[in-house]
Amino acid sequence: MNGKTALITGASSGIGAATAYALAAAGATVVAGARRVDRLKELAATADGDVVPVELDVTDQESVREAVTAAVDRCGGLDIVVNNAGVMLSGPILGADTAEWDRMVRANLLGTLYVTHAALPHLLESKGTVVQISSTSGRIASAMGGVYAATKFGVNAFSESLRQEVTEQGVRVVTIEPGMVDTELADHIGHDAVRAMARQLAESMRTLRAEDVAAAVVYAVSQPDHVAVNEILLRPTDQA
Ligand code: NDP
């Protein structure tokens, strides 16, 4: 990864932070974006490699354009984008707080679209790679996760279209679909009973660790140029 620049969204915790550590350790310059800049600074201070914190709200197109420009200006180009920022506000459809639906659609789906749109000209120039952190929920929807799954199905659909549009120009599109990972994601669920259910489920198995997903990202982006790893589905062995 020496000489490569990677922009990672949602790098302030969980999978994004683990991916930032892993790509920096592999030699890439990592531009780490999120809203909690204090956490990004901590990440930069503790990484074994070059990590540049950038304030980023993926739901705000101006903020997205600024982060992409900051990465390109600082590093002279952009080779890898990891669209990882996301929220999971699970709950029943009946009586749902639709403001939570808006938050999920804006961060998970529109955020991925905006970042890809802003980065694509630079990735075409570098013949780079886009990595989408989707989910098993991008393949199979389940009760209490309808809108979250809709955003991840959307990410998968968008990514397949993007792949067909840019692969012959040398840009690789990778969709990664993890099952349950031990992060703070489910702690933000507003519905008390559903949050408790999610916690119980996590405690019932050996979940994936954020580092397991980061290793999948590193695998995908470090293949030779002629190899496009388009999709990786990884679940905890204990998750049926
Ligand atoms: P975390 O809650 O630890 O991380 C989510 C990250 O997204 C945070 O860094 C947060 O940063 C960032 N984020 C949220 N909203 C925005 C925004 N508007 N702009 C910029 N950044 C934002 O959870 P995970 O690490 O688990 O989640 C990362 C991705 O992995 C998500 O897309 C999630 O859907 C996916 N995933 C997670 C699974 C799991 O079981 N944990 C399973 C499958 C997929 P900040 O608040 O500082 O902005």
Image (cartoon, grey):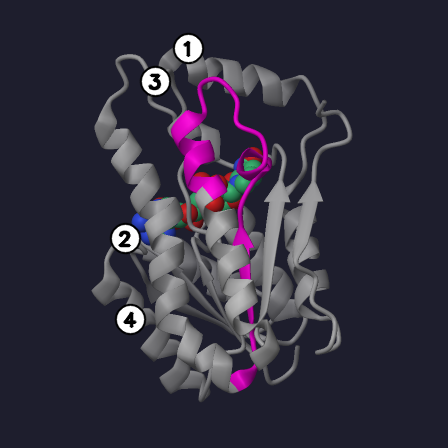
Q: Is residue 129 magenta?
A: yes
Disc 1 versus disc 2: distance between alpha carbons? 28 Å
User: Under tag 2, what secondary structure?
Assistant: loop
| Residue type at the position of mark 2 | Thr
Image location (x, y in percent) of residue 168: 60, 77
Residue at numbered disc 1: 193
Disc 3 versus disc 2: distance between alpha carbons? 23 Å
Of the residues tagged 3 and 1, which is closer to the observer? 3
Q: Which mark is residue 93?
A: 3
User: Under tag 1, what secondary structure?
Assistant: helix
Q: Is residue 22 magenta?
A: no
Image location (x, y in percent) of residue 143: 48, 17
Ligand 1 is found in which quarter of the picture? top left
The mark that comes first in sequence, 3 or 1, is: 3
Q: Foreground residue, 38 or 59?
A: 59
The mark that comes first in sequence, 1 or 4, is: 4
Does the CB distance between marks 4 and 2 fall below 8 Å?
no
